[in-house]
């Protein structure tokens, strides 16, 4: 056997007159299901035409491949789109420390990540979202038993060199500029990603503050009306595509994302940007309607600080390996990666389900009173 590529699933056996073997997923592994024998100009597509020696060879290859596959375990992570860089960096470092473990990342809007487990029955070993409360609302108690808050973020107003008035917009005049004719604004869908309702919270808080004069009157409703449906993104990743492709001029995104993508952005005051726990009562003076579950009507959701959370679902295939990944994320190296990615890690991490929290995570955590 000259070479085997586990990413493409091809085995080259040219020394035996065999061109390649194709492998497909079977359980957690890929195994041979189709192959071709090349002798001169003739190609034989079926193993029964090749003799017992070939069938025996394929069985040995399959067994060897399955044996090596069983030694490489995969931790499946469903995570918020805004966690893309942090999770990619953490997965790489985690794999370096645990060579027999790989981490498969599936980014999406946070509601989508949680619903894939609770409504579609998909199996993940680790779920991380941009609003820790989603785990309580969507996954507990039927699909998870605990929820750990591990990092914070804030909302900023991102723009680019192409954006009109990019050199003039400030924390004091942004409502007036965004309401100008010809300015293209994008936002996220609050039913699929927390960034969507976090943005609406910011708009409502700005309106309630009274700090923007006439432009601040009915600000939230007016901003909603200036965003056409085609620029309501399913998650932050799509919203960034709108902004970086110059389809829109401005978008409210998480600070971590703006920094990671080297975007220009306007910092908002703490009373608006949802960054601080001690301002939770101020944030709670606004509310929006959000559909948490597809099978339910929309429910009112009060403003709250941006707090990221994660859990290990009850149906996880590899709960012990997922706990090891969680411990890495909460440990010194993981916290360093969080800061590098633009987040503010919580030390200790916080939970309302202390009695259900795995023992290995308790040394990094504290109970919320």
Image (cartoon, rainbow, N blue to C red):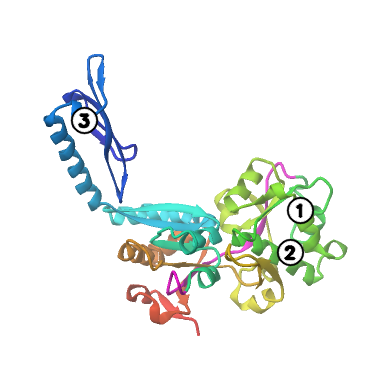
In the picture of the structure, the residue carrying the numbered disc 3 is: 47
Identify the mark nearer the N-term, 3 or 1: 3
Depicted 264 relative to depicted 208: above or below: above
Picture quarter containing residue 253?
bottom right
Residue 96 highlighted magenta (yes or no) = no
Tell me which segment is drawn in magenta.
141-163
Q: How far is disc 3 from disc 1 in space, using C-alphas?
A: 69 Å
Label 3 neighbour load within 10 Å: few <14, some 14-19, many 20+: some
Checking the image for residue 169, the label placed there is 1
Label 1 neighbour load within 10 Å: few <14, some 14-19, many 20+: some
**Front residue (pair 118, 229):** 118
Checking the image for residue 203, the label placed there is 2
**Front residue (pair 79, 360):** 79
Q: Position of residue 200 (x, y in %)?
A: 70, 63
Residue 196 as seen in the image, left or right of residue 59: right
Depicted 305 relative to depicted 175: above or below: below
Q: Position of residue 41 (x, y in %)?
A: 26, 14
Residue at figure coordinates x 37%, y 73% from the top left = 361
Residue placed furthest toward the bottom: 369
Identify the mark nearer the N-term, 2 or 1: 1
Between disc 3 and disc 1, the foreground one is 3
Residue placed furthest toward the front: 48
Between disc 2 and disc 1, the foreground one is 2
Residue 159 highlighted magenta (yes or no) = yes
Q: Is residue 116 visible?
A: yes
């Amino acid at each position: 056997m000259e070479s085997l590529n586990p990413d493409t699933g091809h085995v080259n056996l040219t020394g035996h007159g065999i061109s390649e073997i194709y492998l497909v997923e079977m359980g957690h592994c890929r195994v041979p299901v189709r192959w071709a024998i090349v002798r001169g100009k003739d190609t034989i597509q079926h193993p029964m035409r090749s003799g017992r020696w070939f069938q025996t060879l394929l069985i040995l290859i399959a067994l060897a491949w399955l044996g090596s596959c069983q030694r490489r375990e995969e931790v499946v992570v469903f995570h918020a789109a805004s966690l893309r860089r942090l999770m990619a960096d953490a997965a790489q470092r985690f794999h370096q420390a645990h060579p027999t473990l790989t981490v498969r990342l599936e980014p999406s809007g946070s509601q989508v990540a949680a619903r894939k487990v609770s409504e579609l029955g998909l199996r993940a070993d680790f779920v991380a979202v941009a609003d820790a409360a989603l785990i309580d609302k969507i996954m507990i108690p039927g699909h998870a038993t605990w929820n750990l808050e591990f990092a914070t973020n804030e909302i900023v107003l991102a723009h680019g060199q192409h954006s009109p008035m990019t050199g003039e917009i400030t924390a004091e005049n942004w409502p007036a500029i965004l309401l100008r004719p010809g300015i293209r604004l994008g936002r996220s869908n609050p039913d699929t990603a927390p960034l969507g309702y976090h943005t609406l919270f910011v708009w409502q808080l700005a309106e309630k503050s009274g700090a923007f004069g006439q432009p601040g009157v009915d600000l939230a409703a007016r901003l909603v009306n200036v965003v056409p449906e085609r620029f309501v993104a399913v998650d932050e990743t799509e919203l960034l595509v709108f902004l970086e492709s110059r389809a829109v001029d401005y978008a409210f995104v998480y600070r971590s994302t703006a920094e990671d993508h080297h975007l220009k952005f306007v910092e908002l005051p703490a009373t608006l940007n949802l960054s601080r726990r001690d301002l939770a009562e101020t944030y709670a003076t606004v509310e929006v309607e959000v559909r948490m579950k597809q099978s339910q009507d929309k429910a009112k959701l009060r403003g709250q600080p941006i707090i990221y959370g994660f859990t290990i679902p009850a149906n996880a295939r590899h709960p012990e390996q997922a706990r090891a990944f969680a411990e890495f994320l909460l440990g010194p190296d993981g916290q360093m990666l969080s800061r590098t990615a633009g987040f503010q890690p919580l030390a200790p991490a916080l939970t309302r389900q202390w009695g259900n929290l795995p023992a290995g995570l308790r040394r990094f955590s504290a109970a919320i009173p």
